[in-house]
Structure formats: structure tokens, C-alpha cells
Image: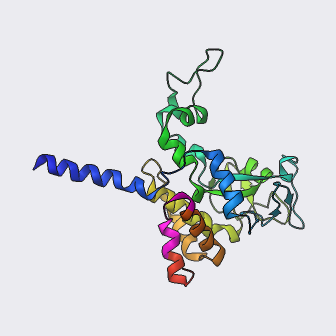
Amino acid sequence: MRLYSALIISMLVVLPSYAANHTNDSFSKAKKMLERDVYNTHRVTLYCGATFDSKKNITPPEGFETTKYVKRAKKVEWEHVVPAENFGRAFSEWREGHKECVNSKGKSFKGRRCAEKMNTEYRYMQSDMFNLYPAIGAVNALRQNYNFTMLPDVKSDFGSCEMKIDSQKAEPPKEARGRIARTYLYMESNYPKYSMSGQQRQLMSAWDKQYPVNSWECQRATLIAELQGNENEIVKIRCEASGYD
């Protein structure tokens, strides 16, 4: 009986991971699939609504401006909406390193490089396409790993694009908030290594309700599910309720 109970408990622990990405552990491959098979007919960035072509060249929206990372503003990059560091810190290889994380000069390293080298679970999380969105390179660079919040007294850092960054916090434009929220909720629901703070979860739950899915978000989720082999159940349920299934 004890053995049976232990087996049931172990199954319950393992099952959530199968709702997440477990088919592709290559970040590079994930970006290529997104470019080729998901965004090929919808080349629009998440935060600023900029368009980009097949060579990653950005056409910014009218009035967009930046004084930092000007060269990166010309190219599209793939942004982890839930920053890699925010879930990467849950892995010992990120925090402490590993005996095999040594460079050619014999110097030990840790952080993202070590987690990517040594931990398959981390690689699956890093490569999950539901958490990857196109962004203007300069916006991606300035957002860094900052959590989202409301910044009512802060002006936009990017002219007409209402992306605000201040004091290691970021407030995205209204058009992006629903997609961001459902991405955060998906990552927390499917990866035991990642957990939001209570304040962040409350904000994401509010944005999820306030900013409903649209047809593109639902189409994107369907395309990624076909490529990656798992559903974003958060988005799927919202799409079915809205008639976008």
C-alpha cells in the first residue's frame, strides 16, 4: 500500500511537466521556428507594434524613438516575457555553477551559460515558444529582467510606444498586457521551478481579465502547440470562451 501511494504521489509530481515544453531544448531552434512557422504572416512586435521583415529588419511605428541601444533598435530580437533569469535562479547551476562549467582558461562560470550547458529542464524552459515574443532590440535590451508593474507617473522611454521602464520595473502598453499576463500564468502553471510573487500574480490575473484574447493570440497559440507538442491551456480556455477556437 505504501509503495502504491508513493507511486501515485510521484505521478502527480511528474505530470505537470508534460503540460510544458518537452520536445525542443534549443533556444536557437525555437527562435527559428517562430520566425519561419509562426510569425511569417504576422511580423509584428509585442510591445510597440513595429513590423519586421524576413531579415529581421525593423520598421518602427511613427513617433518611436530611443537614445540607447540605437543599433539594436533596427533589428527584431526574441524576448523572454518571463525573463530567463527569473526562472533560471531556481537552478543550482545558475546560482552556484557546476564542476563541469569551466572555460578554456580553467575559470569556473555560472549563470545562464552554466544552466544551459548542464540542465535539460532549464533548456526546455528557456526554449518554450509560448514565452518568446518578437521585440525591437532596444526595447528588449532596456527591459532586461525587470518585473511588470504599473508606473502611472512615468513617461514612455520610447516616444509614441507606451513602454515605460523605471527603477528596475516595466509597464507595457495596454495592447500587450493580456498576452503578457497569460504567458506568466502559463509559465507558473506548467513549470514547478517558476513561481510569481503574490503581487505579480494578482496583477497578471487582473490583466488577464481586463485585456481579453484576440484572434491573433489564439492563432499563435494554436501554431505553437502544433510545433511544440503542448497546449497553453490558459490561452486555449480563453479562446474557446471567446469563440476563437
User: Is residue 3 found inside the magenta-colored segment of the image?
Assistant: no
* Residue at x 46% of width, y 52% of height: 195
x and y percentages locating residue 5 in the rendered image: 17, 51
Total label count?
0
Q: Is residue 65 left or right of residue 82?
A: right
- Foreground pick, 111 / 200: 111
Instruction: Identify the colour scheme used.
Output: rainbow
Q: Quadrant of the C terminus?
A: bottom right
Residue at position x 55%, y 83% from top?
Answer: 242
Q: Is residue 101 above or below residue 92?
A: above
Q: Position of residue 65 (x, y in %)?
A: 88, 58
Residue 139 image offset from top left, x and y in percent: 77, 53
Most common secondary structure along the magenta stretch = helix
- Residue 232 in the magenta stretch? The answer is yes
**Res 108 visible:** yes
Q: Bounds of the magenta span?
A: 227-237
Residue drawn at 66 percent across, 15 percent down? 105
Direction from residue 152 to residue 233 in the image, left or right: left
Give me the residue at 59% from left, 36% from top: 112
Please tell me in which quadrant of the rendered image residue 173 appears. Answer: bottom right
**Residue farthest to the bottom?**
243
Q: Is residue 171 visible?
A: no
Where residue 141 sits in the image (x, y, percent)? 75, 47
Compared across the picture, whether 61 is left or right of 184 comes to right
Q: Residue furthest left?
A: 1
